Image: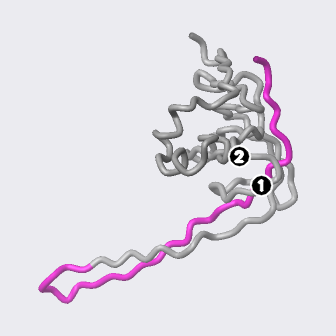
Amino acid sequence: MSQEESQTIQAPSEALPEAASVLDPLESQASPEGLAGIATNTSTYAIVQTGGKQYRMEVGRFYDIELLSASPDEAVTLTEVLLINQGGTVTVGQPLVAGATVQGRVVDHIKAKKVLVYKMKPKKKTRKKNGHRQPLTRFMVDHITPGAA
């Protein structure tokens, strides 16, 4: 298969009643409806790869991703979309979903929490303390484009 091919999988609309005992045996005993009390997530989201990491992104949320070269309030389009879920219809890319993009904007450039690195050699008077703060970009997702199916 080529890199641009995609598969579309239809998620089941109803949860199986026997799945209640697998997910939470106390929930199925407490309520006769089984999984009726558990909310199903049917919102649109995308799995995006950026900076060597994968993120599950939804519209209207911000994410701290690896540093991008864009300035604050600049529009950015992420094109490495691995999966898209639109109201239960899942499109899986092999490896990428053809034509799918995630549009957003850079809110700010920040630093992560400090990570302390402490090196020491026992029975010697060698100690070295160092710190690191990873530069990050706060990215706000504005729109998810599913691309061709």
In the visual, does 144 lie left or right of 69? right
Q: Amino acid at mark 1?
A: Arg
Percent position of residue 60, x then y: 82, 52
Residue 146 is drawn in which quadrant?
top right
Judge whether residue 130 is colored magenta.
yes
- Given the current orientation, which residue lies at the most extreme front position? 32
What span is colored magenta in the figure?
Answer: 120-149
Percent coordinates x, y for residue 5 in the rendering: 65, 15
- Residue plotted at (69% across, 41% down): 40
Classify residue 19 as left or right of residue 32: left
* Colour scheme employed for the rendering of this structure: one colour
Residue 71: x, y in percent?
Answer: 81, 59
**The N terminus sits in image quarter:** top right
Foreground pick, 17 / 61:
17
Labelled disc at residue 57: 2
- Amino acid on which disc 2 is placed: Met
Q: Nearer the viewer, residue 68 or 40?
A: 40
Mark 2–mark 1 CB contact (< 8 Å): yes
Vertical position of residue 39 compared to residue 8: above or below: below
Q: Secondary structure at mark 1?
A: loop
